[in-house]
Image: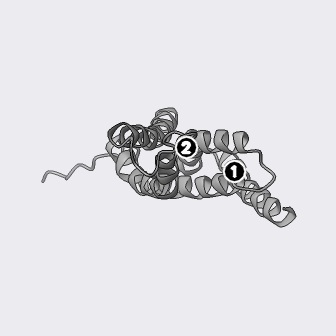
Amino acid sequence: MIQPTTVPPPIEKPFRRVVLAGLVGVLLPAGLLGWSFLMATLFPDSSRCGEYTGCLGFLVDAWEVGRWVAVVLAWPLLHLLRVRPAWPVALLAALFLAAIWQLAQAPWVPRFDAFALIVVSGPLAYPLAALLSATRILWPWRALFGVLLLGLYLLTLFAWILA
């Protein structure tokens, strides 16, 4: 009698996972900026364009709505790039992103620094989430990234309380 063979699960490579998650963190904000540029090019006479500010209104629209669309699109993009499992990375990255965005909107953060925080939020959040959810990472490292996430939320909380 022939015994059925079981296929071993694929060996996860943490470095590959982190790099691909970082790529997602770069692609999603680039998509938002590309959408803003495209809308400004197609509709230069829109009410979103001003005499002194140019078409920054499209960028504001992309930020207000598009950031949440990007969070939702993260899972399919991670899955497409074969980051497995993709849903923990997308979920943890959303938690990191929400904390970074709230910190960027704190009243004491200068506007240029807030913009820089927002721009680097994706390239920071997705690799950190990939590390935190990786199965081959030792528990002390996972705990370190978990403490980092908790510290980020506490910093955000204190930033709003002290403001």
Q: Position of residue 24 (x, y in %)?
A: 45, 40
Extreme residue toward the left, this view: 1
Residue 26 left/right relative to 151: left
User: Residue 38 versus residue 140: which sits nearer the camera?
Assistant: 38
Q: Is residue 102 above or below residue 26?
A: below
Q: Position of residue 30 (x, y in %)?
A: 45, 37
At a point 56% along the width and 39% down the height, the residue shown is: 123
User: Residue 43 versus residue 66: which sits nearer the camera?
Assistant: 43
At a point 48% along the width and 53% down the height, the residue shown is: 61
**Mark 2 vs mark 1: which is more N-terminal?**
1
Res. 67 mark: none
At a point 55% along the width and 56% down the height, the residue shown is: 92
- Would you call the spot at circle 2 few (<14 residues within 10 Å), some (14-19), or many (20 or more)? many
Residue 11 left/right relative to 100: left
Query: Which amino acid type corresponds to the residue marked 2 in the rendered image?
Result: Gly
Extreme residue toward the right, this view: 162
User: Residue 81 versus residue 156: which sits nearer the camera?
Assistant: 156
Asked which secondary structure carries label 2, the reply is: helix
Residue 142 appears in the picture as rendered: yes
In which quadrant is the N terminus drawn?
bottom left
In which quadrant is the C terminus drawn?
bottom right
Q: Position of residue 16 (x, y in %)?
A: 46, 33
**Which residue is the site of mark 2?**
122
- Which of discs 2 and 1 lies nearer the camera? The answer is 1
Residue 4 left/right relative to 13: left
**Which residue is the site of mark 1?**
104
Asked which secondary structure carries label 1, the reply is: helix
Residue 85 appears in the picture as rendered: no
Pointer 2 with pointer 1, Cβ within 8 A: no
- Would you call the spot at circle 1 few (<14 residues within 10 Å), some (14-19), or many (20 or more)? many
Query: Which amino acid type corresponds to the residue marked 1 in the rendered image?
Result: Ala
Q: Position of residue 117 (x, y in %)?
A: 66, 43
